[in-house]
Image (cartoon, helix red, strand yellow):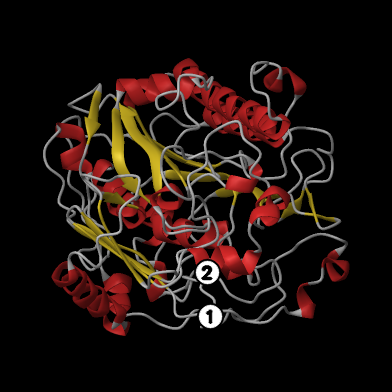
Amino acid sequence: MQSVITISLIFLITSVHNLEGKRPNIVFIVADDLGWNDVGFHNPSMITPNIDKLAYQGVILNHSYVQPVCSPSRHAFMTGYYPFKAGLQHLVIGNSQNVCSPLNMTFLPKHLKQAGYATHAIGKWHLGFCSWECTAEYRGFDSFYGYYNSRSDYYTHFRDKFLDFHDGYNVVWDKNGSYSADLYADRAEHIIAKHNKSQPLFLYLPYQNVHEPLEVPPEYEALYPNVETPGRRTYCGMVTALDAAIGRVVEALKQKGLYDDTIFFFTPDNGGWTPYHGNNWPLRGGKITIWEGGTRVAGFVSGSRIEQTGSVFNGLMHAVDWHPTILTAAGLSPDPSLDGISQWDAISSGSDGKRTEFIYNLDDTVPATQGHAGIRMGDFKLLAGNTGLYNGWYPPDKMNTEEVLEEEFSFEERLKAGNESYYKLFNLKDDPNEYKNLADDMPEMVQKLLKRMNEYRKDMIPAKIPPTDPAANPKYFGNVWTPGWCKKPMS
């Protein structure tokens, strides 16, 4: 593994000039906890006109996969490496843990910046912040506007009674009462308006929506009078608020004359979170599981440089592929030692993708709350051990809160439910919703996938789960969640 990272550090990205001789502008949108069934291009009851227009004008990714929770996916997006090679395969980075995405893995914006891009991040970081070296402006971004932790209040911007809102090195105190999606759109409009058009632009937009807490301006919730479940109604409004913010970015790019040479990349970080009304129907499970509902997401690529517009890409795409795919779209050559595979040529031209397999997760922690181990090879998927917390199928507009789930099955019983049979084998071509476990019927296929999964396991490092560090307490930093309380993150 060390040799792989060393190669990555010394690898020099070479230019591959496109026909126009100019690098495209790139907008990389990450929607937090957005479910498979929570976009209009999958579910017509959702009001997402801006997202849908981009998706239909581009290429919808029908088999796009991510990690079952947040920090691991974001690590994969930024580095092109599986989380299990970085010790980030267990749950997420806590707000007082001295750990971050490894500093010896180069982030996507650093490559783009070296190629002349202006690089800006707006929204949720959640890749670690104990040291300033872990933060956005040390990892390739010219600016950062947003929050560091996993969650925040949408209006007060507080996490656990302490503020978490930053503009670079400065703390943002004066936005109490303003909805975060609106603030992020404001900042994106400002950056676009001031941008030098002779320089290519990279906007990374990891929105807060639709992670809990469930909060949205009432005019968006009012758009869903037919949704009976109050939490689901609020959640749907949050999706439409996200869509409106994306629409403002699109309009700003048009006003600046940048839209016609911009490529949009869109992905959630994991499936919808069942108890907070995210919905992945008809897929099984949700966030914090390695079922399809936790890992198969509603993604797309859109823009003028797409050759095969208005199409669906049925090839496999994984979170680690975004890094090399975006670099290739920018006219650069990604490091061949990455776990990620560039899918740009296949997606843009409508040809077959190069990926034939991927790892869902490898986590030997007990319990592996978000799922112990899983692999897909071709049409077959093998899960080993615990699969996560939400093991059923959850129709929309139903009460699936933790309290309701607890009435039926305790936390321990739900963990056990995904482990009734240690090996779970599915043919996803014939059974995309994972109803029939084929493990007993196809023992040779189980062994084939298990052998391949164990080959990946050779590169796994133990999950980094440091204890809470009291030095992180915001009371030492003016009641603000602030970087700089560890000398070096856990290696």
Q: Pick whichever of labels 1 and 2 is earlier in the sequence.
A: 1
Using the image as rendered, state which of residue 2 and residue 433 is in the foreground: 433
Using the image as rendered, state which of residue 26 and residue 282 is in the foreground: 282
Instruction: Give the percent coordinates (x, y) of residue 454.
Output: 26, 79
Q: Quadrant of residue 265?
A: top left
Name the residue type under label 2.
Answer: Lys
Identify the residue under disc 2: 416
Q: Quick one: SS at disc 2?
A: helix
Circle number at residue 303: none
Using the image as rendered, state which of residue 235 and residue 97 is in the foreground: 235
Q: Quadrant of residue 162?
A: bottom right
For the N terminus, give its image quadrant. Answer: bottom left
Q: Is residue 417 left or right of residue 198?
A: right
Circle number at residue 366: 1
432 w.r.t. 425: above or below: above
Q: Is residue 91 visible?
A: no
Within 10 Å of disc 2 (Cα), the crowding (few <14, some 14-19, many 20+) is some
Q: Quadrant of residue 276?
A: top right
Within 10 Å of disc 1 (Cα), the crowding (few <14, some 14-19, many 20+) is few
Q: Is residue 265 visible?
A: yes
